[in-house]
Every structure is written in structure tokens, then in C-alpha cells.
Image: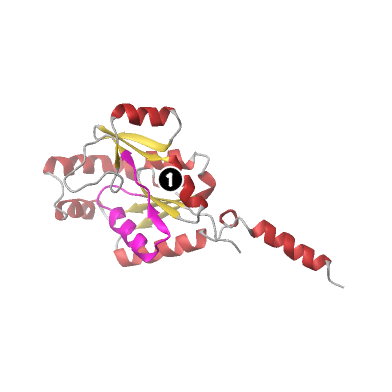
Amino acid sequence: MQNRRGLLIILSSPSGAGKSTLATRLRNWDPDIIFSVSATTRAPRPGEQDGREYHFVDEAQFKHMVTEGDMLEHAHVFGNFYGSPRGPVQDAIESGKDVLFDIDWQGAQQISNSALAPHVLSIFLLPPSITELHRRLVSRAQDSESTIERRMSKSWDEISHWDAYNYVLVNDDLDTTETQLRTIIEATRLRRIQQPDLTAHVRELQSQFEDLP
């Protein structure tokens, strides 16, 4: 049988709950999982390359893409626009690649309501505690104190949308959570809609059955 259709795997969590680390682990586990490269209006950070970390566009170009329906989802976050271009995602899933999205609940909702909704697998990661969430943000030493406070204040709003996802995991241990994610993905790949050649195969079986003496 022909290769399957790909999935749109949405991985969401409040900052510090581990989604970026787990997204990297999933991609290392299976090369058929590719990362959705978002478009953004923010300026590149040192070391970032256009088309690798993000597609860097100006605000006028970004809004034009939204108007033309070329974004699967988009949002305004911390003063900048972010969005997922539709074309590369469509091409990837039709070729059997899974596309991984590291986005918030608003983006997840937009993709889940899009024309590609039948191929969406959405997963939300919860921290084991708010104290641990804060500790992780501080220990990674990537943000200023004010940014950490802003991320913490936003975390409850993100957590409050946990029940809009297909699966919800408490990320208490990275290895355990990674195993759970792999299991979920492997099972979802076997859904009937992800196997485009099943109908033809069943028809062939029916034909063979009718040809029996």
C-alpha cells in the first residue's frame, strides 16, 4: 500500500512546560516529522537565518498573506505577528510527512477549525506544578526577570484551554512524556483517514472475493 498522509501535530503548553525540548526529541526520533517554519514580523536574533528558524517578513507582507488565506493560523504575540504558511504544510502532509507545530492555544484552535482539521493531532503539556514551571523558566536563563513574570502571568490563560486538545499530558519526566507522545503519534497515524489507499485496497479485496469459485 502507498504511504500514509501526514499529520498536523500541534504541541502546546505554557512557557517552561517542555514543549520545545520534546519537539526536538520527536524530530530526532523520526525524520518524517518536520517542523513548521513560521512567518514572523519580529527582527532576526543573532544566529537566526531566514527560512530556518522563521520566515522573516514585514508587517505589510504578513497581513497580505493573511488576507489571501495563505496562513493556517496567525496571532499577535508580545508586539509581533506570527503565523504558519499554508502551502508548505499542505505539500508536506500529502507527501507523508508529519508537520509539528509549537504554537499556543489560539493558533491550535485556528488550525483545528481549518480545512486540514481531519489530519490534526493536538496535544497539550501541563507542568507538574506552578512552582516547577517558574523554576524551569528561571533555570534556563534565557529571559529577563520581567519577561519571566510576563510569561508566568500568561501561563494560567494558556492552561485554562487544556480541554480543547485531543490529548493532555503532565510533563513531570521528559523520558516518560516522550514515550507517551510517540505512542499517541504512532496510533494516530493508523487512523483510517490517514491511509488514502485503504478504499482501493478494500475494493480489490472485494473483487478477489467475487472471483472466488
Q: Mark 1 points at which residue?
A: 88
Q: In this view, does 33 lie to the left or right of 213?
A: left
Which region shows up in magenta?
12-39
For the point 33% across and 45% down, which residue is it?
A: 159
**Residue 160 picture location, percent across and down:** 36, 43
Pick out the residue farthest to the right.
213
Number of residues whose C-alpha sits closer than 10 Å to that of mark 1, classed few (under 14), some (14–19) or many (20 or more): few
For the point 45% across and 65% down, which residue is it?
A: 183
Magenta-span inclusion, residue 37 = yes
Height in image: 23 above or below 61? below
For the point 45% across and 55% down, which residue is it?
A: 98
Q: Is residue 40 left or right of residue 4?
A: left
Q: Name the one closer to the observer, 101 or 46.
A: 46
**Residue 79 picture location, percent across and down:** 24, 32
Height in image: 59 above or below 134? above
Q: Name the one closer to the observer, 7 or 182.
A: 7
Pick out the residue farthest to the bottom.
213
Q: Name the one closer to the observer, 77 or 194.
A: 194
**Residue 89 picture location, percent across and down:** 44, 46
Q: Quadrant of the N terminus?
A: bottom right
- Secondary structure state at the residue bearing disc 1: helix
Q: Name the one closer to the observer, 37 or 105.
A: 37
Q: What residue type is labelled 1?
A: Pro
Pick out the residue farthest to the front.
50
Q: Quadrant of the C terminus?
A: bottom right
For the point 27% across and 34% down, which residue is it?
A: 41
